[in-house]
Image (spheres, grey):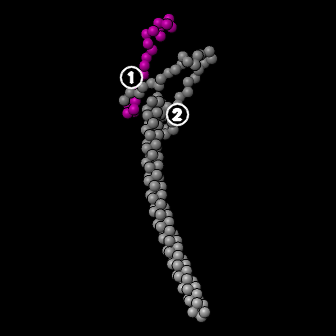
Amino acid sequence: MVNKESLNGATTQSHDFRLHTIDNRETQLLTRIHEWVKEYCDEITIGETRNSRKKVIEINHFLDIQREESEDLQASSLIAMTSLLPAETVESSGPQTAVPQDTKEEGEDATTTDTEPPESSATEEEGEDTADTVPCESSTESTAAS
């Protein structure tokens, strides 16, 4: 019986040793996998952070360009609006934009008083004397008055 008991003991010990070896190998594999996953996720995080920062810089650059273009358009529309105003209004208003208001007497219809701003000639823009460019009364107005 000694041989049978020693054989059972040796078999049990060999089985336990094999299970212990398998457990150690499993632990080693799991540790390596966890380390690999952590490193891989860190690399992805770093790459995504870098890409996100590049995109933010690109968006900020785009917004700067759009803001500059908007300011240029506003400045050009301001210049265009001031060129449509009469010379007296432009000179008295300075850099501010002044829109002349129509003064209506009682009884006038609002739809019949649509007026366009007078066109300025090149001499008015250059600041030359404009005494000869003042419109005089038309012949129909003088005959209607008499």
Q: Is residue 15 left or right of residue 130?
A: right
Q: Which of 117 and 94 is in front in this view?
A: 117
The CA span between labels 2 and 1 is 26 Å
Residue at left 57%, top 83%?
Answer: 16
Please, is residue 93 above or below residue 50 in the view? above
Magenta-tinted stretch: 124-146
Most foreground residue, 60 or 15:
15
**Residue topped by disc 2:** 98
Q: Where is residue 50 in the image (x, y as percent from the top left)?
A: 46, 61
Examine the image and state in which quarter residue 8 appears: bottom right
Q: Which amino acid does label 2 sit on?
A: Ala
Q: Which mark is residue 132?
A: 1
- Does the rendering let one see residue 87? no
Residue 11 or residue 62, whichever sits in front:
11
Residue 64 versus residue 13: which sits nearer the camera? 13
The amino acid type, in three-letter code, at marker 1 is: Asp
Q: Residues within 10 Å of mark 1 (few under 14, many from 20)?
A: few
Give me the residue at 42% from left, 25% from top.
119
